[in-house]
Amino acid sequence: MSPLLHHALVGFIVLNVVIGMVTYVTLLERKFAARMQSRIGPYYVGPHGLLQPIADALKLMMKEDVVPAAADRWVYNLAPLAFLVPCVLIFATIPFAPGLGVADLNIGVLFFLAVSSLEIVGLFMGGWGSNNKYALLSAMRAVNQIISYDLPFIFAALVPVVLRGAFGWFVGAYGVLGPLAFVAFLVATLAAENRVPFDILEAESELVAGFRVEYSGMKFALIQLAEYAHMIATSFLGALLFLGGWLGPGPAALGPVWFLLKAMLIFLVVTWVRWSFVRIRVDQILAISWKLLLPATLVLLMVTAFVVAARGAGGS
Amino acid sequence: MADAEARHVIEIGYGGNERLVMNMGPQHPSAHGVFRAILTLEGETVVAVDAVIGYLHRCHEKLAETLTYVQYPSIASKTDYVSAMTAELAYVAAVEKVGQIGVPKRAQYLRVLVAELQRIASHCLWLGTWCLDMGGALGGGATIFLYAIRERELILDLFEALTGARLLYGFHQVGGVRYDLPAGWPERCRQTVDLVDRRLDEYEAMLDDNAFFRVRTQGVGVISRELALDVGVCGPLIRGSGVAYDVRRTEPYSSYGDFDFKVPVETAGDCYARYRVRMVEFRESIKIVRQVLDGLPAGPISSRPGVKSVGQVRIPKGEGYTRVEGARGELGCYVVADGSAKPYRLKWRGASFSNLSILPHIIPGHKVADVVAIMGSVDPVFGEVDR
C-alpha cells in the first residue's frame, strides 16, 4: 500500500471516529448534566435515549439554512468551515496507541497547540460576518479570551514536555510539578474550550448565543461539531500529557480503551465544573488569566526547566 | 431625583469614537418576561439604559371596573402571576376596608399561611431564574434553577390540594377565604416546609462559598440607602440597602402581629445583599408557616359564607387603600366603590413597577454581563409592572 493511500485511509477512519464520538459525547454530557440536576435526560429516542444524537443530527440537516440579509455572505458561509478544520486537524497528531495515529510528527505537541489556536479565525469570521451586534460582541470577547488563555494553556502543556525532554508524544507521571501543571492545564482548558465558567462568548443570557446566533441548520451543526471536537481533542491531550495516555493494566491491546477512558474522565471533570458554576465576567476572566494563571504557569515552566537542567541531560 | 429624565449617560474616559446601541428584549433569554432595555455600550461597558415597558399591558384596572367583587379576586391573581396569593389578598383587603367587612380569625390565619407559602414559591423561582441569568441555561445556573423549581413544585402541589389550581388560585374572597384546609393537608405542609428548609442549606452551600458566585454578585448593582429611599424601591431591595421596612411589621394586616418573625436587613446594597435578604426571608416564611399551623384557630373561614351568586356582594360608597407585603415588596390596591356590585375605579400599586425604576440609576457603569445579574436581583414580574 502506498504511504499516501495509507494516510488517506487512516485519516478517513479517524475523522469518522471523531465525528461519531462527538455526537455521542453530547449524549454523555446531557445524561451527566441531567443526573446532576435530578432529571433523567434524553430517554425516548431509542433505548435510554441512545439514538438521540442521531435524531438531533438529522433534525439539524433538515433545517432551513437561513442567511441574514445583511450578512457578509462570503465570510458568513466560510466561517463554520474555518472553525471546523483546525478543530479536526488537531486529531491528526494524537496517537491513540503506540503507532496508531494519522501522523507521528516529531513536533506533535507544538502542532496541536498551534493549530488549535487557529479556531479563533473561524470564530471571529462568524461573529463579524453575521452582522449582528450580539455576535460581534461575542467575537470580540472570544478574541480577548483566547489570546489570554492560549499562553497559560501552552505553558501548562509544555511542563510535561520539558520534564520528558522531547517533543514527541510520550506518557508517564512526574513528581510534584506534574499535578500543579495539570490543575493549571484544566483551568486553561475550561477557558480555551469556552466552557462555563468561562463561556462568555456564548453567554446565552446576555448575548443570546454569541457568535453563532445567526447560524442555523447544518452550519450550526458544523460549529457545534467543531466545539465538541476541540473539547475532546483537548481531553485527549490532557490524558496523554498528564494521565499516562494508553498505559494501564491488561494487555497492550487495551491501550486505546484506557486512553479513551482517561480522556472521558477529563471531559467529565470539565462537564462537572460546567454544570456547577455561574459564568464570570469578561474583565474578571482576563484578570484571572493575566494576573494569576499566566505568571503562575510561566514560573512553573521555568522551575521545571531548572529542575531538569540541574538533573542533567533532560532525563531521557 | 433632580433630573426628570431617567436616562442619563455616564461619561467615562473612552478612547473609541463609537457607541453601540443594543436591544436587550423584549424577546431575550434573560428578559424576565417582556422587558426591553435599550443599552448604550462603550465596548463592554453600559453607559446608558432606556427601560421600555408596556408589552404586557392588559387593562387590568379597567377590567376590574367591569367585574364584580366576587369575580375579580381570581383575575387579581393575574397581575403578579408568580405571587398570585398576595395579589388576591391586596384586592380583597381593600374591598373589606371600604365595605368594613370583618374577617374571621381562622380566615386571617389561612391568608397568612398561603401568603407565606407563596413567598417561598416565588423566591424559589427568583433564585432559579437569577442563577440562570448569571450561569446560563447551559451551565451551573441551570442546575440551581432545576433544584429551585423542584421545591417550588412541592409548594404548588400544596396549593393544588387546597384550591385545585397551581398558578392562579381564586382562593381569597371578600370576607374570608373560599376553601378550608383538606384532611391531612397540615401534615403534608409541615413535611414540605421541612424539606424546603433542608434544601435551602444545600443552595447556600452551593452559592455562598462559591467564589464565582460571589465575584458576580458582590459590589454589583449597589443601591445606596439614599437612592433606595429617593426612588422608592421596596421589598427585598430596600431591605438590602439598609432600611428595615416591611409592611408586615410596620402596618400589620391579617393578624401578622400574632407571629414572631424577623425582618432581615443587609447594608451593602449590592446583588449579594439582596440575595442574602431573600435567603433569610425564605426561612422566616417557613417559621411563620409553622406558627400558623401550630396556632390555627377553629371557626368559620368567611364572614359571608352564604355568598353564591356573582353579584351578591355590594360595597357602600367610599374609597380605601390597603397594602400588603408581597414577595417583591409593597403591593397596594386602591378601590373606589359606588354602592354597586362592581368597583367604580381601581388602582394597583405594583412593587415590581417601582423596583424597576431603579435600573437606569444603577446599571450605567457596569458591564453587559452585570445587567442581567442586576435585573435578576431586582426580580421584576412583568404582569405586575404593566398590569
Image: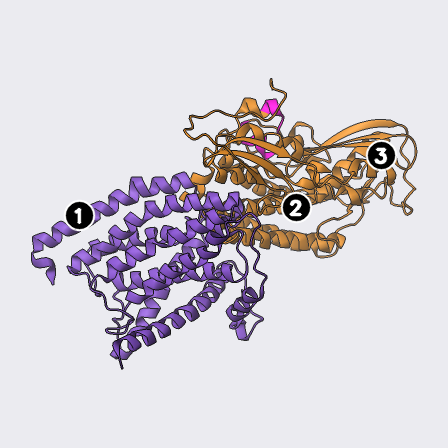
Chain colours: A purple, B orange
Q: What residue is disc 3 on?
A: B101
Local crowd at mark 2 within 10 Å, few (<14), some, or many (≥20)? many
Picture quadrant where residue B73 is located: top right
> Residue A171: percent from the left, percent from the top?
22, 66
Q: Which chain carries label 1?
A: A
Comparing A52 with A47, the one in front is A52
> Residue B171: percent from the left, percent from the top?
77, 47
For residue B207: magenta?
A: no
Q: What residue is disc 1 on?
A: A302
Of the residues shown, which amino acid type is indicated by label 2?
Leu
- The magenta stretch is B229-242
Residue B43 position (above or below residue B122): above
Q: Report whether B300 appears left or right of B14.
A: right
Q: What residue is disc 2 on?
A: B117
Q: What secondary structure is marked by label 3?
A: loop
Q: Which residue appears at 57% of the width and 53% of the height?
A: B195
Q: Report whether A29 appears left or right of A69.
A: left
Comparing A171 with B145, the one in front is A171
Quarter of the image with the N terminus of chain A in it? bottom left
For residue B233: magenta?
A: yes
Whether labels 1 and 2 share one chain: no
Q: Mark 3 lies on which chain?
A: B
Residue B74 position (above or below residue A100): above
- Kindly report the distance in space between the C-alpha atoms of the residues bearing marks 3 and 2: 25 Å
Local crowd at mark 1 within 10 Å, few (<14), some, or many (≥20)? some
Local crowd at mark 3 within 10 Å, few (<14), some, or many (≥20)? some
Q: What secondary structure is marked by label 1?
A: helix
